[in-house]
Image (cartoon, grey):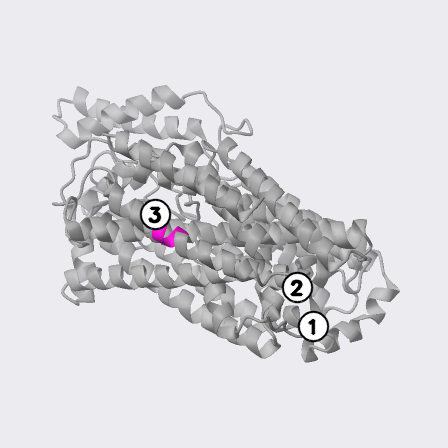
Amino acid sequence: MSIKLLFALLLAFVLSATGYCADSTTAAPAASVTPATAAVAAAAPPQATAPASTPSVTSGVPASVKPNRAITISMFMAIIGITLCVVVWAARQTKSAADFYTAGGGITGLQNGWAIAGDYMSAASFLGMSGLISLYGIDGFMYAVGPMFSFIAILLVIAEPCRNAGKYTLGDILSFRTSPKPVRAVAAISTVTVSLFYLIAQMVGAGKLMQVLLDIPYQVAVIGVGVLMVGYVVFGGMKATTWVQIIKAGLLMSGTVLLAFLVISKAGYNPVGFFTDIVSNQLIQDHVRMNVLKDALPQPGFDYGQRFMEPGLFLKNPLDQISLGIAWALGAAGLPHILMRFFTVPSAKEARKSIVVALFINSTFFFLINIIGFGAALYLSPQLISSVDKGGNMATLLLAQLLGGGAGSLGGDLFLAFICAVAFATILAVVSGLVLAASAAIAHDVYVNIVMDGKADQHTQVKVARITSLVVGICAILMGLAAEKENVVALVALAFAVAASGNFPTVMLSLFWKKFNTAGVISGLLVGTISALGLVLISPVMTYPQKIADDAKVIVTTLEKKQLEGVELAAKDLKQLEKSRLDYTKNNGETSMVGLKAPIFPLKNPGIVSVPLGLLAAILGALLFRERRAEEMFDEIEVRQITGLGMAKATDH
């Protein structure tokens, strides 16, 4: 695959997009889900949506996201053009395996910090979390502040030892004092599993986002994003991926800061008045009552506005909050594409610096996301947000259009187009990092170190890495096309759960426990991965049609009883009754994708169970199958992780 071919495919994608846009006279599908943009949070259950006919009470906001196509496509093309120039520049400097996997170790701490932030601030964070806050209040805030704490574990425990003990991949760290071939094989499986689940969610999110925003068919959007993603990685390797992530992080922070400032400005720079207005807003109160708590009629004396500012609307079980906290705190420290970034800096000092920079950027970003989410709830209304997208993922885009001047205004169209382009760049940067992590695991761990016993020359290693990246990218495109209608929120939850349950315990024990060995690594990775997978498949995060039908039946029974008693229902209650009847008819008797009518495991995130299981399996495996060589080599890895002795120096091109 050549750069000319990449440009040709890109041109075909753009022409197709422009053609569809020119011919389209209808609005984007109002109920299209952009799960996560993948993610965390596009988790509003289907039954929690307001009727599509809910009128907008906000001047200047349409009932669907309608960007100015000419402006939006121009901004998309500007971002694509800039990043492709970066790819061409990076391709000329990518000659060795170290260049391809780690940019020759020549990335500074400041640059790496921005790149890590770009890796971590996904479209899930930008669109999904703000949407969750706009629909569920404080529970969405819990999702938004959690990622801040994950970098504390990385800074204090993981960053420096991993940078000093590894080379390119997770497998390098885990196989240092164990039997390399079986450990690298299992580590590669774990890396590819985490990366692909996360990658599929991003691909589906990209396809849905483009479908809603530009009326581009889902398939065309996924293929277009996939072609760009493959081009970034195949030609530019880690250097191109790093700079794409830096550019994206800068754009994302700029858009977030500006949007949050406009929300604060609209509130008169008065935070107390801002939250008082939220609590007293009638539309927010109605949303909490009807769509979240499912109260067909108001309970006397109950303050539904205040309830919006209290926990438990989305995470109703306190154990869910604990489990989610475990996944946030430990999951990022086990994500392969985050771990790879520690190998791109020239020293342990720069590794620590990069985490401090990333922590500062991420903390600022997630704090501002809360302001944006609450602003969307107040100035748009949860009913409008959920009628456009039931997961709330369009809340940020609708708010940008409103605060920019409203639909049809130049300011509104420009600001909306900019935020759309930023979301697009966010997806491109994240998927590039994921593809690189997965391809590195296959090419470096499996081909070079298992098949070739580490004897492949530099030219062959780079060639295989590029071929592997192409294959991984094609697989991601195909799986993204196949997963169009799947609940990809579960896939994202699974990615973090697997990383926290399998990768993190084995990395920790490999670095700090003398008795840890091959059996411990394999058992920890396998048990952690399998338990997380199994629990997610039977958890409430999956879609259960029968649960939707049962909830709808309760509303129908309550409202029909009131009608029989002679009570005249309000217009909004009549719409709720009609919608609930349709929900019951559509979902009654149906099952989830694994054949269940209701979840067996009660928590939305399995971390509270799967993390201890993975850790326990790793410890028991090491104790039951002692390995003298692993114990004897502990002193060497301890010296390496403290001093960096034996690490390759940065490559200067």
The amino acid sitting under disc 3 is Leu
- As helix, strand or loop, the secondary structure at mark 2 comes to helix
Q: Residues within 10 Å of mark 2 (few under 14, many from 20)?
A: many
Residue 100 at x, y percent in the picture: 62, 59
- As helix, strand or loop, the secondary structure at mark 3 comes to loop
Query: Is 527 contained in the magenta span?
Result: no
Label annotation for residue 648: 1
- Relative to 137, does residue 360 appear above or below in the rendering? below
Label annotation for residue 313: 3
| Rendered-image quadrant of the C terminus | bottom right
Which secondary structure class fits the magenta region best? helix
Q: What is the quadrant of residue 535 in the picture?
A: top right
Q: Residue at the spot x=63%, y=60% of the render?
A: 101
- As helix, strand or loop, the secondary structure at mark 1 comes to loop
Q: In the rendered image, is residue 613 in sight?
A: no
The range drawn in magenta is 76-80
The amino acid sitting under disc 1 is Ala
Label annotation for residue 98: 2
Q: Nearer the viewer, mark 1 or mark 3?
A: 1
The image shows a total of numbered marks equal to 3
Q: Residue at the spot x=47%, y=45% of the render?
A: 7
Q: CB under 8 Å between callouts 1 and 2?
A: yes
- Relative to 17, does residue 264 appear above or below in the rendering? below
The amino acid sitting under disc 2 is Ala
